Image (cartoon, rainbow, N blue to C red):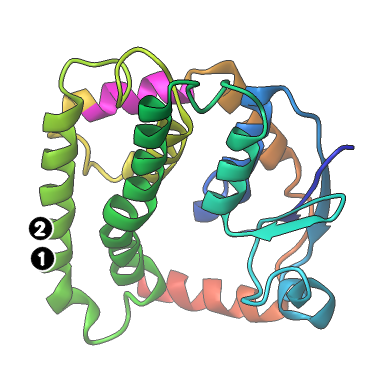
Amino acid sequence: MRPTITAFDWVPDFAKGQVRDLRVRWALEEVGQPYDVIYLSQGEQKQAPHRGRQPFGQVPTYEEGEILLFESGAIVHHIANTHGTMLLPADPAARARAVEWMFAALNTVEPPIMDHATATLFERGKPWSAPRLPSVLARIEERLGELSRRLGEQTWLDGDVFTAGDLLMVAVLRIIADDGLLDGHPTLRAYVARGTARPAFVRALADQMAGFTGAPAPEFAAWLARQGERA
C-alpha cells in the first residue's frame, strides 16, 4: 500500500525547501517507497479534518493502512524501521546509535537553531528579539563545535554508513546553511554537502518544490507585508 503524506501547497519563499515534509519525502526516497501527497492550503491545517490527523495543526502527517502518524521524526523512524537496513543498520548496537543521533538532531541541535529563526524572522520586530540573539548564537556555536568535533574525519556520524540519524541531522543543519553559521565549521559544511548530494535528497527536494502551486492566505499576505516593512 502506498503511504500518503500531507504538505502545504504554498509557503513563503524563505520556507521553501525547509518544511518538514521534506524529511519524510527524503526517507521515502532513500528506501524506494512511492507515496502520495495531500496538499493543504494555508489555514486548512488548522481545520477539523486535518486536526483529526495532527492535533497541533501542522504538517507532515503519514497514513498507511491503519497507521496514522504525525511528527517528522516519528515518521522517519517508522519508515526506517520498516524498510530493512536501508536507514537503520542490522547490528543492534549500530541501530541504537543511529536512533540516538535521530534524537540528538531533533532534541539537542535543532532547538537553538529554531530559536534563531524565531529571533531573526518570526519575531524579529519584538522588543525581546535583538537582546536575546547573542545568547542564541552562542548556544548554536556551542552545539556546532561539539558536533563537529564528534564527526571528525568520518563520512557520517557513525562511520561510513548513512543512517536515519544523518538524514535528520543534515535536515536540521540545512536550516542555517545559508546564514553563514556553518562557515566556521568546514567539517559540517562538507557533511551537509554530502547529504544533500544524495540522489534521494535531490528527488525529495524537487518534489517538494514542485508542490508549491497555491497562493498565500490573506493573513499570510499581511504578515509578509509587515516583514517587508521592517526589512
Q: Which residue is mark 2?
A: 138
Q: Could you tell me if residue 19 is visible in this image?
A: no
Residue type at the position of mark 1:
Pro
- Mark 2 touching mark 1, by CB under 8 A? yes
Foreground pick, 186 / 178: 186
Q: Which residue is mark 1?
A: 134
The vertical placement of 108 against 90, above or below, is below
Q: Crowding near pointer 2: few (<14 within 10 Å), some, many (20+)?
A: few
The vertical placement of 59 against 217, above or below, is above
Q: Residue at x 14, y 58 (%)?
A: 139
Between circles 2 and 1, the one closer to the viewer is: 2
Q: Is residue 216 left or right of residue 145?
A: right
Residue 194: image location, x then y, percent: 39, 19
Mark 2 falls on what kind of element?
helix
The vertical placement of 214 against 141, above or below, is below
The vertical placement of 85 against 55, above or below, is above
Q: Residue at x 38, y 49 (%)?
A: 103
Foreground pick, 13 / 119: 119
| Residue 35, quarter of the rendered image | top right
Q: Is residue 129 left or right of residue 48?
A: left
Mark 1 falls on what kind of element?
helix
The residues colored magenta run 188-196
User: Farthest top residue?
Assistant: 160
Residue 163: image location, x then y, percent: 45, 27
Quadrant of the drawing holding the C terminus = bottom left
Residue type at the position of mark 2:
Ala
| Residue 84, quarter of the rendered image | top right
Quadrant of the drawing holding the N terminus = top right
Q: Is residue 3 left or right of residue 11?
A: right
Q: Could you tell me if residue 146 is visible in this image?
A: yes
Q: Which mark is residue 105?
A: none
